[in-house]
Image (cartoon, helix red, strand yellow):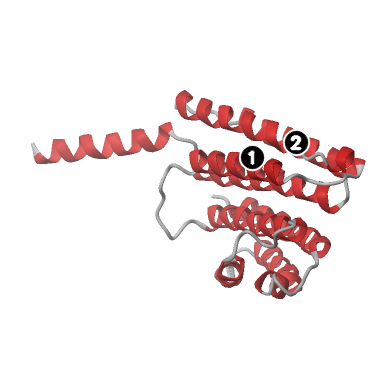
Amino acid sequence: MFARLCCIVVSLFYLSQSSAITLKEQFNLERQAYRVASSFYYISFDEGSSDAYQELEKELLNMDSELNAIKTPNVEQLNDIKASWETMKGFSRQNEMKDDGYTSHYATVDLNTSRSDLVKIISSESYAEPLPEDVKALRLAADMQRLAMLYAEGSVSLIGFPYDELDIDAKKFGEELRALEKSLTGKSPEAKKKAKEAVRAWVYIENALIQYYEINVPELVKRMNDVIVSRLLDVSELTAS
């Protein structure tokens, strides 16, 4: 009887796990939500240039593609994510820098609130550490994009950096990125090479993110973020089982 009960519990556990979006999908969606928000702030940094608005539209399409590619039995969860995404998408287009010459505080608040709500729904499923290297790389890619987003917001904000733990998060990220690179020693030479390139790019912006109140180099952070995220996606693909 006890054995049968255990089997039922285990079966229900795996059923609940399979009904949710996968961890890989979760981290990809989180990263893309942060990327859309980053593009909103880059519009302000680039003073409303057409290129910046086009970049935002490209990232909106990328998020749509990520969502459309998800195949999950949990239709309710996916619909909740899509509904929340539509709200964020609308607010992400409310940066009036081009027409008014500034980005209103209210537009920023709306974007941040909708982005936070979306990420909360996306990341509603808990998970246990340690993660496999391919999944860990995707989580770090999302973490890096989040750091770049927060730095971009602070760089263009008229009231300074609204998030005051960027230095703590940056230090933690650096430790985890170096740990990932070290863990690949003797496994996949190509993945190890990509991770090393990510660490090398991180070194260029590490101090800027830790000393964010003193060092203002949003363009450099944007470029290096793209390199780091790209290399981490490569690591994930190369280490996938």
Residue that numbered label 2 is attached to: 94
Q: Position of residue 31 (x, y in %)?
A: 63, 48
Q: Position of residue 233 (x, y in %)?
A: 67, 52
What residue is shown at x 49% (from left), y 44% (from top)? 123
- Identify the mark at residue 25; answer none if there is no mark: none
Res 181 visible: no
What residue is shown at x 78% (from left), y 40% (from top)? 95
Res 171 visible: yes
What residue is shown at x 68% (from left), y 36% (from top)? 63
**So how many labels did they put on this image?**
2
Q: Is residue 123 above or below residue 133?
A: above
Farthest residue in the right direction? 50
Q: CA distance from mark 1 to mark 2?
A: 9 Å
197 left or right, relative to 72: right
Farthest residue in the left direction? 1
- Neighbour tally class for label 1: few under 14, some 14-19, many 20 plus, Cα within 10 Å: some
What element does badge 2 sit on? loop
Residue that numbered label 1 is attached to: 110
Q: Is residue 142 above or below residue 88?
A: below
What residue is shown at x 74% (from left), y 59% (from top)? 225
- Neighbour tally class for label 2: few under 14, some 14-19, many 20 plus, Cα within 10 Å: some
Q: Position of residue 42 (x, y in %)?
A: 80, 50
Of residues 214 and 139, which is closer to you in this image?
A: 214
Label 1 or label 2, whichever comes before in sequence order = 2
Q: Is residue 203 above or below residue 157?
A: below
Of residues 117 and 121, which is closer to you in this image?
A: 117
Q: Amino acid at mark 2?
A: Gln
| Mark 1 in CB contact with mark 2 (< 8 angstroms) | yes
Q: Amino acid at mark 1?
A: Asp
